[in-house]
């Protein structure tokens, strides 16, 4: 069977050669540096002996010792990573075997037989929405054969079918078959060398200077040692980009090849469905966990994986994903529904290709197209519910979440999540039109004479909703083009609408997009007017007045939001110096700038309190905090230390100011839209 497996592509072979060359060059240079350090020890040691042979006294002894120490310190700097312990822990994993999970191991045995690879040394379950092949990458593993381990995420099992899980495992065993994985071991060691020598060397340099003590001669030799080390660091650092880019490029080809093996021995439809659902599964799991973190330890999950499934269902309903065979069906078009960007920039650092690119390849791969298996993958895992509870506990420990708070069941989680997620309250009648768009119409009275009957189905059609995301995509693309135009050396080329451009050409595309943005904004404004006219037309006289008032109020709130947010954005950079350790004189200079910037911000804060549409939403306690700031004469720093009360006070002011803007804006928008949605029922 293995003779029929897909062969590696020419692109794979090319990237493999490049990776091998870059690894070889790196270790050759590293070896040269080690030999140079040994030569230093020999030459400096020889010089030390000569010095002592000329005269044996206090100065020559210390001088000889200092000379020899330079070479020794530089040599230790280069090889100390070998002796650093590997701190990788498997405490967050759960090792399983065939006696525990016979059905899962039956699938593993079947794939091992079909691919002809060696079975994994160990199989672990992890808490994540992921699966991976790994091995304990220590220094000696570069020279000795090592057995690979397989790790399967419970969050992945929880949201896949048996057939989909089989395609994922086949992909991972595709990696087992790749001898080029050994290159990853060499890169891993190169990363350790670079990390230890370039980015984690400050403690060693400090040790050298402390070891030199108060002796002036030793101090000089300590500085010389550090100078040599810094020179060696610059050489190693210069190699890092070359090395890691080539390896990332190889890893992307390895992913394509592992996909090809999976396609061949499984079912491409199940392979693509699992890939397309992966992001939704991951978002549902992480959002569930973040809910507990954001509760400030008030709640704890009993089973995160039940929360994951429930939240996946909520998100699917919100985004109109149909459920087929018990799982949401995600189409390739759904991945680009919210991302209308027309710019493609290849990320040279990423190790995984884009999912859509993987799916394009999968659809052209050779396959035996095995029969689909729509059973839930969790059904083949013995004691799955208990495993989920164990993994929930391990995940909380892994992320250092304290074991305090009320443990809640899934039903309570759903209720609390919906209560705290304001966007869940937007009417489904609007088809997601307002989730990234605000109902702002200036001079709305001018729309009243034209108020006429419209079909509300057309007002919130997929075509109209797509305009919202097209606007967002154009705005994002303009920002990217502006960045490329101002940083032409960072990224050499990019694609726009499928055509290849140089970075220097980016500025020429901006006017075209600005014209498109104006067109889309005009279309959205016309649709917003039509929406208002429709609801105005179906309302009685009293409701018409209320609807008009709410639209006018929200237009004011929207305009003031931009004004007040700009004031806050202009002011907060003046506070950043407090988060850094600076000389006293520098602090005083920054404080002077802060006190000057405070005056216009205080005037704007007073306007917010007394003469804005936001004042009605101010709670008494929050209003007192803002008023106290307006009347204050804070100095923040005195007698060479920060005044903690004043520093805390200004931090609280910023928090209350921002929260007021965000909450009142969202609540006002929600009030208008709920009122509008209710008119359909009148």
Image (cartoon, rainbow, N blue to C red):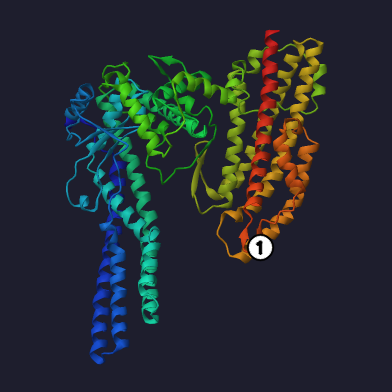
- Which x, y percent locates residue 302? 40, 25
Relative vertical location of residue 146 with respect to residue 550 in this rendering, above or below: below
Numbered-mark total? 1
Q: Residue furthest bottom?
A: 55
User: Which residue is at 69% across, 41% downward?
Assistant: 565
Decide if residue 128 is in sight here. no
Q: Is residue 359 left or right of residue 511?
A: left
Q: Quadrant of residue 97?
A: top left
Q: Who is closer to the viewer here, 591 or 163?
A: 591
- Which x, y percent locates residue 339? 53, 32
Which image quarter holds the C terminus? top right
Residue that badge 1 annotates: 588
- Which x, y percent locates residue 589? 66, 63
Which image quarter holds the N terminus? top left
Q: Quadrant of residue 32?
A: bottom left
User: Which residue is at 78% across, 13% downward?
Assistant: 543
- Residue count near mark 1 (Cα–Cα under 10 Å), binned few <14, some 14–19, many ≥20: some
- Which x, y percent locates residue 362? 34, 28
User: Which residue is at 41% across, 39% downward?
Assistant: 399
Q: Who is closer to the viewer here, 415 or 264?
A: 415
């Amino acid at each position: 069977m293995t003779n029929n497996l897909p062969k590696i592509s020419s692109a794979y072979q090319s990237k493999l050669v490049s990776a091998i060359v870059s690894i070889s060059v790196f270790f050759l240079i590293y070896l040269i540096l080690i030999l140079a350090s040994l030569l230093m020890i020999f030459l400096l040691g020889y010089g030390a002996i000569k010095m002592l042979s000329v005269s044996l006294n206090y100065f020559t002894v210390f001088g000889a010792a200092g000379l020899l120490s330079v070479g020794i310190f530089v040599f230790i700097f280069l090889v100390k990573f070998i002796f650093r312990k590997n701190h990788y822990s498997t405490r967050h994993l759960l090792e399983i075997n065939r006696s525990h999970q016979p059905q899962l191991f039956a699938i593993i045995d079947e794939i091992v037989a079909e691919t002809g690879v060696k079975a994994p040394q160990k199989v672990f379950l992890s808490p994540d929405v992921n699966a991976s092949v790994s091995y304990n990458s220590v220094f000696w593993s570069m020279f000795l054969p090592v057995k690979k381990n397989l790790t399967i995420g419970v969050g992945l099992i929880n949201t896949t079918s048996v057939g989909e899980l089989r395609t994922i495992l086949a992909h991972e065993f595709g990696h087992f078959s790749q001898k080029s994985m050994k290159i990853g071991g060499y890169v891993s060691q190169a990363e350790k060398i670079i990390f230890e020598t370039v980015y984690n060397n400050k403690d060693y340099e400090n040790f050298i200077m402390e070891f030199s003590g108060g002796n002036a001669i030793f101090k000089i030799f300590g500085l010389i040692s550090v100078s040599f080390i810094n020179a060696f660091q610059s050489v190693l650092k210069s190699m890092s980009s070359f090395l890691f880019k080539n390896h990332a490029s190889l890893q992307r080809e390895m992913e394509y090849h592992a996909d090809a093996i999976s396609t061949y021995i499984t079912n491409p439809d199940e392979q693509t469905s699992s890939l397309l659902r992966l992001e939704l599964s991951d978002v549902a799991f992480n959002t569930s966990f973040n809910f507990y973190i954001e509760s400030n330890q008030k709640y704890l999950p009993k089973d995160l994986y039940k929360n994951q499934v429930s939240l996946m269902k909520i998100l699917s309903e919100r985004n109109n994903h149909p459920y087929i065979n018990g799982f949401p069906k995600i189409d390739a078009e759904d991945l680009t529904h919210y991302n209308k960007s027309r710019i493609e920039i290849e990320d040279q650092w990423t190790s995984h290709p884009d999912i859509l690119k993987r799916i394009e390849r999968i659809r052209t791969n050779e396959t035996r197209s095995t029969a689909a298996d729509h059973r839930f993958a969790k059904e083949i895992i013995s004691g799955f519910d208990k495993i989920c509870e164990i993994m929930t506990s391990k995940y909380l420990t892994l992320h250092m979440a304290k074991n305090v708070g009320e443990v809640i069941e899934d039903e309570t989680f759903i209720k609390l999540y919906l209560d705290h997620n304001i966007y869940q309250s937007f009417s489904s009648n609007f088809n997601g039109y307002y989730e990234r768009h605000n109902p702002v119409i200036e001079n709305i009275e001018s729309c009243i004479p034209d108020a006429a009957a419209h079909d509300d189905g057309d007002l919130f059609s997929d075509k109209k909703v797509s305009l919202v995301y097209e606007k967002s995509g154009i705005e994002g693309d303009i920002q990217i083009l502006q960045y490329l135009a101002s940083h032409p050396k960072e990224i050499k080329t990019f694609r726009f609408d499928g055509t290849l451009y140089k970075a220097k050409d980016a500025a020429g595309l901006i006017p075209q997009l600005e014209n498109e943005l104006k067109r889309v904004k005009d279309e959205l404004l016309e649709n917003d007017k039509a929406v208002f006219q429709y609801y105005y037309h179906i309302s009685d006289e009293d409701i018409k007045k209320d609807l008009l008032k709410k639209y006018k109020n929200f237009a004011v709130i929207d305009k003031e939001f931009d004004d007040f947010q700009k004031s806050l954005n202009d002011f907060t950079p003046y506070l950043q110096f407090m988060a850094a350790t600076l000389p006293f004189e520098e602090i005083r200079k920054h404080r002077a700038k802060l006190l000057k910037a405070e005056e216009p911000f205080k005037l704007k804060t007073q306007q917010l309190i007394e003469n804005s549409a936001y004042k009605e939403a101010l709670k008494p306690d929050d209003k007192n905090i803002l008023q106290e700031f307006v009347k204050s004469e804070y100095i923040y720093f005195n007698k060479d230390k920060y005044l903690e009360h004043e520093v805390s006070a200004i931090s609280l002011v910023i928090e209350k100011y921002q929260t007021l803007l965000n909450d009142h804006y969202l609540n006002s928008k929600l009030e208008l839209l709920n009122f509008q949605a209710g008119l359909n029922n009148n």
